[in-house]
Amino acid sequence: MKAGWAMAGAVAAVGGTLAGLGLVIARNLTAPAGGRTYDLTVRGVENSVERTIVVLDRTAHTGASGIYCLILENGGWVRLSEGMVDRGPGFVGRMVEDLSGELNAGDRASWSGIFFSTPVEAGLVAMDVWVPTDVGPAPAWLIGPQVGPSTTWAIHIHGLGSPRAGTLRGVQVAAEAGLTSLVVTYRNDGVGPTAGAGRSELGAAEVDDVRAAVRFARENGARSVILFGWSMGAVIALQLARDPEPGVIVKGLVLESPVLDWVSTIRANCARAGLPAWTGTLALPWLSSWPLARLTGLPKPLTLSRLNWIARADELTVPTLILHGRQDSSSPFEVSNRLGERRPDIVDIEPFDADHTMSWNSDHVRWRTALHAWLTSPATTG
């Protein structure tokens, strides 16, 4: 009997520990918008008449080919060109293309695919507008096409934990293709209105704010829209394509590193954080059941099955371009590949050798070319 009670106690303790881990994962996933993590240290700065080189620890990111940005803890931005030089075991030198602020050895920095911090830096002219939503006004950038007015608008939707500036990489191409762009914010993203406890609802509630943005576009001349969804922004875009705002035609979807199935994404992010992938399953009850969701800090449970676009692949009806890195450690490329296999009639996939939302950075010429060709093809212009 004593041994049986001891075993029961051990099982209960393990169960309690696993339940607690599930709560931690769920709360981290839906946490209110916060600051960046500055996990890189500038090891050296080499200045000459011809160039400036920043020396960093060599990692999968810092050693990747392409153009990227270092966001400094002191507020500076360092745009890095494709140039890369070896600086001995464990280090890499990256050539600086442009610098805003000061750069010194010892500075703390964050590696980022966000290459432009403002529309001006991307060579775009933007007007600040406010989209009325049920939870308050949401700021947005309204950016015109390069030539003439357009009745087809591009709505650009950023991802979880990423600012709207990250979408400017796609806005450039939309403007060149003759589209008016609306770069939106939504509830609890750090810039849009605050609702409830400030937690993300993983696209389930945020879709209402972007639906209001589509309504804004219609009221200001849009007759059709192409939805650009980055990471979690794809969750929002896919819902709107399935349930469009009355009076507006969704002509197509452009999805960069899309979240197509939250369960796969949560597992991948657990693995990315050094946990076994299966621990992601522990978070699901804390997101989807009434009493546990409240303890997580959510106003209501999330029906993640409604956000699984592999299971709902047959419901997709519009041309879709997916730009996705094969090394994506957050939103698995394999999931995008499965959607392409399910719907080869309307889904085109452009793969890159890149991590999450860094396809543009890894090969911006090919990324821009592929997107421009798709935006100007008969499938999306007809």
Image (cartoon, rainbow, N blue to C red):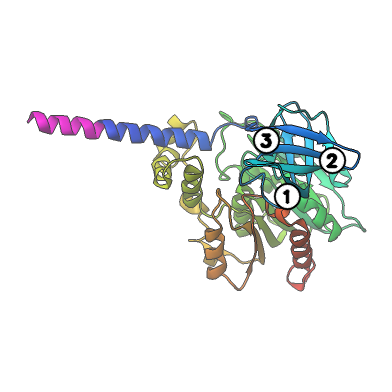
**Residue where numbered disc 2 is placed:** 98
Q: Which residues are magenta?
A: 1-12
Quarter residue 190 falls in: top right
Please indicate, yes or no, whether residue 265 appears anywhere in the rendered image: yes
Query: As shown in the figure, which amino acid type bears the numbered disc 1?
Result: His
Query: As shown in the figure, which amino acid type bears the numbered disc 3?
Result: Ser
The structure residue drawn at horizontal position 49% and vertical position 33%, both measured from the top left corner, is: 27
Query: As shown in the figure, which amino acid type bears the numbered disc 2?
Result: Asp
Task: Identify the mark nearer the N-term, 3 or 1.
Answer: 3
Residue 324 x/y as whole percent: 63, 57
Q: Are marks 3 and 1 in contact (CB under 8 Å)?
A: no
Cα distance between the residues tagged 2 and 1: 26 Å
Task: Identify the mark nearer the N-term, 2 or 3.
Answer: 2
Q: Are marks 2 and 3 in contact (CB under 8 Å)?
A: no
Q: Is residue 122 magenta?
A: no
What quarter of the picture does the N terminus occupy?
top left
Cα distance between the residues tagged 3 and 1: 24 Å
**Residue where numbered disc 3 is placed:** 110
Q: Nearer the viewer, residue 69 or 346?
A: 69
Crowding near the residue tagged with mark 1, few <14, some 14–19, many ≥20 C-alpha atoms within 10 Å:
many
Assign a secondary structure to mark 2: strand
Assign a secondary structure to mark 1: strand
**Residue where numbered disc 1 is placed:** 156
